Amino acid sequence: MKVYFGKNFWGSGEDGTEMEEIRLNQSFLWEDISGFIPSVYVDEEGIAIDFCIRVSNEKLKYFWDKWQQKLEESSEEDLEQIANENPLNQVDFHVQVAVNGEPLQNEFGCGASYTKVFGNKNIKDSLEEQLFLAYQCDENSSWHFKRHICRWSEKPQKIEEITIDFLAYDKRLKCDKLEIGLADAGKEYPLIHPLSGAQYVLCVDKAEQQTLPKFLEKVSDGLAYQEVPSHFLQITYHMQPDIPSSAFLLQCAQKGDKPHRYIAGREANVTVIGSTDGPTSIFLAGRIDKKQGHVAASECFYEPIERMYWTPIFMAKERQNMTLSIKLQ
């Protein structure tokens, strides 16, 4: 297995030097995630660590049987649920690495998955199969491969210990949709945390129609422009008991209007988030006074809106962080 600093699984080493492999075969068990670290790779710039994470074929088959007939006609909500339920996605995580007690700077990471459950005819001789064979993975399971690359601040003369902090990503836990509009200031909506079962109340402080300045977005070097929708609904609320903004959000559950494209003969400078073909979203940074509590903004529409559906989302880690220390002889 040839590995090059700054390259993902598919990157070639035409402009780099092959990293030196240190074979480990270090197994790990992190609550419901099991796997092993086959090797680390080092050079003058940094270190690359490969992870092989085992995925149950039974879970993958159940997932595939449930969703394969719906893939072509799936809504955006279905696609998000499919991604969340995919067992190959559920084993992903972030890591923080230290060598000889010195924390390293994260460079980047990449991932790839190997399974025969989905009937993928292109898996033969693929990069995923090469990883599967090179690391002698158990053929009775499917596998998710993860590579994490860190840069030295100063390369150690000898690697004596590698410490890896396994850090779980936050998962989006959705509650039933709420309909909230201009007339609902002062209303309270009870919520139950989907994971912990803790009870919360979302209290609406203000519901306001807001309007962005009208502008045109130039979409080519010619005379094609598009008018961007400018009306949105803004909800200011607080939670009882209080919860950090990083642990909860109220997300608009309705798609906004798409921009109208037409021919015009003048320039325009705009700031838009999203593609030219999709609904227009707005970015509220710099518009929110943190003293007023939590703020949610809808997508944008051409006409003012009075009511819409919102999705309450709790952010939570499904497992506790774990530290693995590997001593090298």
Image (cartoon, grey):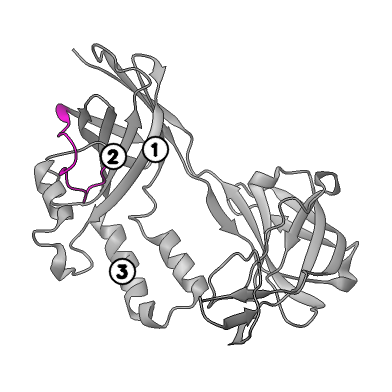
Tell me which amino acid carries mark 3.
Trp
- Of 206 and 105, nearer the camera is 105
**Residue 258 seen in the figure:** no
Instruction: Please give the name of the residue rendered at 49% of the width and 78% of the height, measured from the top-left corner.
Output: 75
Q: Is residue 180 left or right of residue 75?
A: right
- Of 156 and 23, nearer the camera is 156
Give the residue number, with chain letter if any, for mark 3.
64
- Is tag 1's residue or tag 2's residue first in the polypeptide sequence? 2
Q: Which residues are magenta?
A: 7-23
**Spatial CA span between label 3 and label 1:** 24 Å
Tell me which amino acid carries mark 2.
Gly
Q: Position of residue 59 (x, y in %)?
A: 31, 58
Circle 3 — which element? helix
Tell me which amino acid carries mark 1.
Glu
- Is tag 3's residue or tag 1's residue first in the polypeptide sequence? 1
Give the residue number, with chain letter if any, for mark 2.
6
